Image (cartoon, rainbow, N blue to C red):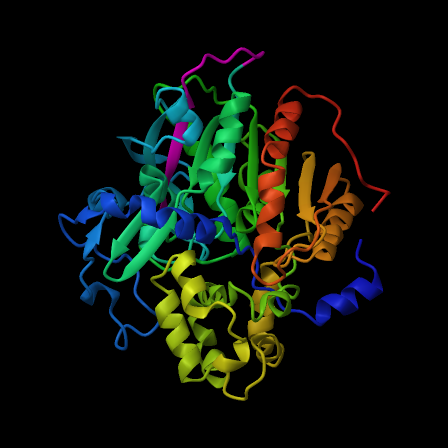
């Protein structure tokens, strides 16, 4: 449970949570290698969402130029009528995924067969929506007891443009286009591969609004929790798998994905009691929306606040007046620009800038939000910890994480423990190498790449779960 001192500390911060960072690093490192593969697009892909003020900026007015990503526009367009049942499969198609380096060394074969999927979920506003994703069926037979288990992978920050959807970037490894310039790295495969290695079937959600119509409601607790749970429901209904309706199911993610995994764990008893959820693993979960903006303000990923504001305004258009009171012209332009970007170009466009540049009064966006009770109320509705998972949970965080403060993860663990959850807190004791450059946020994900998968497979086998409650 939070102490009074931790509550006072939390009150001094405002969070731009879940800023996953591997994408930027992969994009910079791989773009030169993949650039020769970029070919002219067959046709521009229609933007599924526009900026907040359609009259001021039209992303569809720009030609896509050249891209190495196949044109899958038709697949991502939802039907006029959606199924009534959350988790219902709307459509599927076979999918090719760029092999990893280990795959290439072994002959280039992905250890799983892939499908692109579209399924029905429930959006941030509470209505039916279509969400896309990727299902990976292991080629190796399941050797454990009972039916094969299923792992839902919840991706870290991708961006807000439709081209950033994980199911698109995973197909080519690094999705790149020239007009406007855009890079999207398929780094969700890092977590997916570790799960496949343990024997899980894997489904990776694209979340609401990535690939499909509407703004992606970035770090919205309800939206990303439902997208994850309905991805599991959809995977369990697919034809031609070795899953069973009662297959043990787990959820794993890092950064934004860690928050989504935590949200799924909290929401499952009420929203998806039909799922046989046995464990969750939340890496660097942004659990306190009054916690991290001041920590990342001025860092590489400052501009990701634009994703959050765009998503808030899509769900809560009544807050436009409050944001207009606080944002200056540069701030409004930041919303327009980030609305169609992936995380790499947002880092290039707004990295190392201060949010004071975006406000009318020259105060930080943290202070601006504190001055608007309705904005503050919505941000607090994104918080985690008010309810708790009913299954064991792992929370992983770096001691020197420069995006999600270590103490907010500790507070989440305490909140869940107080509500009866068995929780393991795993702190990656890595030195601070480059504060503000998101390296200290990303390194624990890489150093602990197999931790989540091993922890969750132990939950499948019903082994005693480690428990940090009473020691944190």
Q: Quadrant of residue 276?
A: top right
Q: Is residue 190 left or right of residue 372?
A: left
Q: Residue at x 20, y 45 (%)?
A: 71
Q: Is residue 250 left or right of residue 203?
A: right
Q: Quadrant of residue 421?
A: top right
Q: Which one is in front, 52 or 468? A: 468
Q: Residue at x 55, y 22 (%)?
A: 198
Of all residues shown, which one is farthest toward the right?
470
Q: Is residue 304 above or below residue 253?
A: below
Q: Is residue 218 above or below residue 95?
A: below
Pinpoint residue 312: horizontal percent, then vertical percent.
Answer: 47, 66
Pinpoint residue 309: horizontal percent, then vertical percent.
Answer: 47, 68
Q: Residue at x 44, y 26 (%)?
A: 102
- Using the rendered image of the protein, determine whether residue 343 is visible from the camera's viewpoint: yes
Q: Is residue 131 magenta?
A: yes
Pinpoint residue 84: horizontal percent, then vertical percent.
Answer: 36, 41
Part of the protein shown in magenta:
130-146
Q: Quadrant of residue 160?
A: bottom left
Of all residues shown, which one is farthest toward the bottom?
361
């Amino acid at each position: 449970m939070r102490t009074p001192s931790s509550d006072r500390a939390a009150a001094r911060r405002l969070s731009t949570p879940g800023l996953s960072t591997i994408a930027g690093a992969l994009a910079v490192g791989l773009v030169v290698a993949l650039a020769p593969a970029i070919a002219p697009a067959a046709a521009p892909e229609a933007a599924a969402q526009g900026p907040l003020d359609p009259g001021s900026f039209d992303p569809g007015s720009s030609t896509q130029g050249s891209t190495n990503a196949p044109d899958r526009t038709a697949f991502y367009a939802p039907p006029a009528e959606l199924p009534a049942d959350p988790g219902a499969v709307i459509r599927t198609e076979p999918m090719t995924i760029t092999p990893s380096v280990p795959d290439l060394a072994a002959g280039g074969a992905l250890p799983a067969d892939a499908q692109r999927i579209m399924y029905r979920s429930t959006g941030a506003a509470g209505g039916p929506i279509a969400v896309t994703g990727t299902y990976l069926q292991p080629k190796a037979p399941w050797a454990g007891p009972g039916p094969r288990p299923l792992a839902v992978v919840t991706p870290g920050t991708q961006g807000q443009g439709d081209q950033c959807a994980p199911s698109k970037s995973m197909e080519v490894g690094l999705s790149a286009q020239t007009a406007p310039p855009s890079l999207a790295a398929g780094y969700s495969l890092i977590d997916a591969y570790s799960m496949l290695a343990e024997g899980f079937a894997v489904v990776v959600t694209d979340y609401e609004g990535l690939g499909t119509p509407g703004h992606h409601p970035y770090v919205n607790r309800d939206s990303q929790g439902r997208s994850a749970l309905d991805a599991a429901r959809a995977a369990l209904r697919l034809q031609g798998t070795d899953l069973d309706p009662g297959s043990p199911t787990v959820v794993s993610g890092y950064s934004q994905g860690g928050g989504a995994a935590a949200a799924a764990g909290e929401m499952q008893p009420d929203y998806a009691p039909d799922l046989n959820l046995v464990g969750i693993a939340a890496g660097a979960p942004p659990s306190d929306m009054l916690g991290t903006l001041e920590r990342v303000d001025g860092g590489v990923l400052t501009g990701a606040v634009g994703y959050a504001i765009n998503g808030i305004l899509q769900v809560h258009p009544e807050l436009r007046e409050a944001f207009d009171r606080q944002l200056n012209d540069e701030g409004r332009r930041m919303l327009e620009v980030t609305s169609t970007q992936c995380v790499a170009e947002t880092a290039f466009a707004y990295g190392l800038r201060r949010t004071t540049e975006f406000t009318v009064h020259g105060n930080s966006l943290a202070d601006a939000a504190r001055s608007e009770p309705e904005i503050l109320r919505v941000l607090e509705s994104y918080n985690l910890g008010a309810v708790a998972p009913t299954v064991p949970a792992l929370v992983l965080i770096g001691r020197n994480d420069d995006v999600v403060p270590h103490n907010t993860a500790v507070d989440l663990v305490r909140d869940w423990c107080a509500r009866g959850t068995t929780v393991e807190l795993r702190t990656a004791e890595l030195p601070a190498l480059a504060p503000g450059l998101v390296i200290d946020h990303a390194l624990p994900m890489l150093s602990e790449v197999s931790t989540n998968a091993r922890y969750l497979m132990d939950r499948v086998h019903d082994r005693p779960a480690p428990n940090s409650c009473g020691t944190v």
